[in-house]
């Protein structure tokens, strides 16, 4: 996500469906208190989760 990949691209890289990526992304947003992908990535950087 931090590399700007779409859900479909992430799914292909991880050998899972796009719907699975969407589900995990939604849960990640909730846990980080993020409203969208950009906010989630920024929160991940601040928390040291993304290098």
Image (cartoon, rainbow, N blue to C red):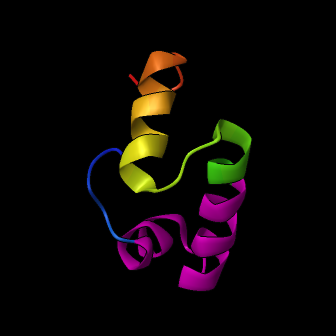
Residue at the farthest left position: 4
Observer-nearest of 24 and 38? 38
Relative to 7, is 2 above or below?
above
Nearest the eye: 22 or 43? 43
Magenta run includes residue 14: yes
Residue drawn at point x = 54 percent, y = 82 percent: 18
Which quadrant holds the C terminus? top left
> What range is drawn magenta here?
7-27
Q: Nearer the viewer, residue 25 or 11?
A: 25
The quadrant in which residue 20 appears is bottom right
Determine the image quadrant of residue 39.
top left
How many numbered discs, if any? 0
Left or right: 22 as drawn, with respect to 41 = right
Query: Which percent across, then down, holds residue 10?
Result: 43, 66
Q: Residue at x 46, y 56 (%)?
A: 36
* Residue at image point 71% right, 50% down: 30
Q: Nearer the viewer, residue 5 or 33?
A: 33
Residue 29 vertical placement versus 12 (above, below): above
Majority secondary structure in the magenta region: helix
Q: Position of residue 19 (x, y in %)?
A: 62, 83
Residue occupying image coordinates x 42% and y 40%: 41
Residue 45 drawn at (x, y percent):
42, 24
Q: Quadrant of residue 7?
A: bottom left
Determine whether, in the image, residue 47 is placed left or right of residue 38.
Answer: right
Residue 38 visible in this rendered orientation of the protein: yes
Name the side, left or right, on which 51 lies relative to 18. left
Residue 1 visible somewhere in the drawing: no
For residue 25: magenta? yes
């Amino acid at each position: 996500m931090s590399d700007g990949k779409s859900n479909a691209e992430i799914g292909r890289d991880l050998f899972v469906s796009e719907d699975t990526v969407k589900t995990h992304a939604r849960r990640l947003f909730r846990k980080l208190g993020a409203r969208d992908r950009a906010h989630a990535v920024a929160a991940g950087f601040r928390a040291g989760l993304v290098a």
